[in-house]
Every structure is written in structure tokens, then in C-alpha cells.
Image: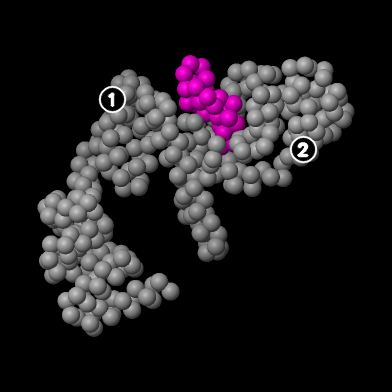
Amino acid sequence: MKSRITPYLTERYKETFLFDTLAAGYWEKEPRLAFMKGVPVPFKADDFKAFREGGLSIAKMGENMLFVTGMDPAFPHAGSYAEYLRVCFAVKVREAFLHDAADATAKGDLLRACVLFRGVLALASGDSDGENGAYLCDAMFGLAGACSEMSRKLEEPAHMDETDEESRAREEKCGQFKAEAMELYETMTFRFPEFAPAWYHLGYCYLNMGLYAKTDLCFKKFLALADPERQAEEIKEINERRDQLADPITIEQGCNAIIAGRAAEGIALLEPYRESQFRNWWPMHFYLAQAYVDMDRPDDAVASYREVLRISPSNLEALMGLSDLYEALGNAELADKYRRKYRLLMN
């Protein structure tokens, strides 16, 4: 299980566990656990004292194993730990840790929640059918929700004494948790296509990225699957969202047409929005500028590039596009002006 968030979880809990290999005789008491001979067992500091004074319960050792597995699913002994948990607890351990993970989410301990949900995922990996599929679905959905909540928490206003380096690290961490959540929701729509909440949340992930056509497809799928009684409020909300998406979808189609080389089609779709409530969407003006260049309409292209810079003054692509355009028009002075600004920002 490759994951963007593993480094953040291992960093949080790297000092929590120590590992020790138990004597072979310990495992010989229970033949079903013979495969654990030579496998290092994770202990917390207090566990060693309990182990020496009377032994550590298989439940406590199992809890530690699941936590290590959730912290790093690629841990070398994760497979042995998962087998230990299956032999000793069957499905009960999944139920218990799903409950603990949900409780951690509710309390705002989101990194702990991520670890526990991932531990259950590692246990339930396999078929998406039957009881195993239900655990997979619950664990994946819970993990995606914890990652989403973590990204929202990281987007909150920074402390005034936060350094630039700390700010960049926080933004990077936020992006990783956000991307992890979206990938989990995407995976759920493939593995559990009838699970309506995954489509709902994936739609909002796409909406936040400005992918309006994809957003609408997810929302349509959610509406087709949603329970009219239990999800009446969400259905109303999504219907309202879809009404709001009509114009953004048209703008996205126009931009995509220009990217695909259909400049005239893109211009026809985008021009009506230049003076609309969407006039501050700089990508629309940027793609219009490119289309005007392709259609040999240099004055319109200049105006559109200038609109981009009005909205986004440091837009490097617009600065270079405007510089190249002025050079092609024979205006060396303006071409040099925008090229100097481009170089200044690049440095």
C-alpha cells in the first residue's frame, strides 16, 4: 500500500515502539502462532514492564501490531502481524479498531485515526465482496474522511510566528493529505460503485480543483444512488450545486476546445463570459488569448493577456505570452518590458 501520508505518520509515532524477538518457547505454547518465531514484536515502553511481571496480553500485542501496520503498511513484518491478528481475533479486531478510529476522528486526533483505519485496511485487503468488502469500504471511507479533515485543518490560517519554511512544509503536507483523500474516493468509486457517499465526496474534491465536468458526473452518479429518505438533505444540496455548475462547465469546455486546437469553437464558448460574473477567472482569459493568437486576432490577444495580468499580476505564462506577442507585432519596447518582469519573477 503506497501512500503519500506514511512519512507524516511514522514521524509522529517513530518514538512510540521498541521491537524485541520473543523466545521460541513462548510461541510453542500456541501452535497456531508458530509462524511468529523470529518475528520482532512491537512494544511500548510500559509494555516491557508488564511483560516481565506477568506477561502481555495477546490483545495488547495485537493492538501494537495493528498500529505499526497502519503507521507503515510496507513494514517488513506487516504480513506476519496481519496473520497474527486474523488467527487471534478473526473479524472482531476490525470492528474494534474501526470504532477506535472513528472515535479518534471525532476527537480530532486525525493522525491516530489515519493509522487505525489503515491498519484495518491492511487486515481487510482482498475481495470487495461480502463481509470483507464491508470492512474494506468502511475503513477506506473513514481514512479518506480523516485525510480530508486533516487537509482542512492544515488550511486554517497560520500562526503569525510561522516561518516561510514552516509555511511551505504545512502547504506540502496539506496537499499530500488532500491528494490521498481524493485517490481513496476515486478508488472507492471503482471498488464500491454503488456506495453513494464516495461519489458525493469525490465530486467535491473535483469541484475544489476546478474540474467541473468531472464534478457534475460524480454528482449525477450520487443522485442516481442516493436514498431519497436518508439523504434528502444531500440530494437537495447537490441539485443546487449542479444548477450552479452549468456556466463553469461551459467555460471548461471552451478552454478544453482551445487546448485541443479548436480555437474558433473555444472562442464562441468563452466570449459571452468575458464581462460576466466569471470575468475574474484568469484561465478563461489566458486560453482566449491563445485562441486569438491562433485566429490572427492580435489586438484581442493583447487585451486578453492584459486581463490575465489584471487578475494575476505575476502570471509567468501570460507575461511571456504578451512579450512574444509584442515582439511579433514589432513593438520591441513593450516586448522587453514584459520580458524583464518575467525574468525578475523567475529569479
- The x and y percentages for residue 138 are 49, 26
Task: Give me the residue at 22% from left, 77% from top.
Answer: 327
Answer left or right for 184 relative to 221.
Answer: right
Relative depth, front residue between 102 and 12: 12
Above or below residue 298? Residue 21 is above
Task: Give me the residue at 49% from left, 47% from top.
Answer: 176
Above or below residue 112? Residue 134 is above
Q: Is residue 118 magenta?
A: yes
Answer left or right for 36 relative to 213.
Answer: right
Q: Earlier in the sequence, mark 2 or mark 1?
A: 2
Please identify the quadrant where the C terminus is shown: bottom left
Q: Provide the residue designation for mark 2.
A: 19
Answer left or right for 126 relative to 242.
Answer: right
Q: Quadrant of residue 212?
A: top left
Q: Provide the residue designation for mark 1.
A: 224
Disc 2 from disc 1: Cα separation: 50 Å
Q: Which residues are magenta?
A: 113-139
Relative depth, front residue between 196 and 325: 325
Task: Give me the residue at 56% from left, 25% from top.
Answer: 124
> Please, what secondary structure does the residue beneath circle 1 have?
helix
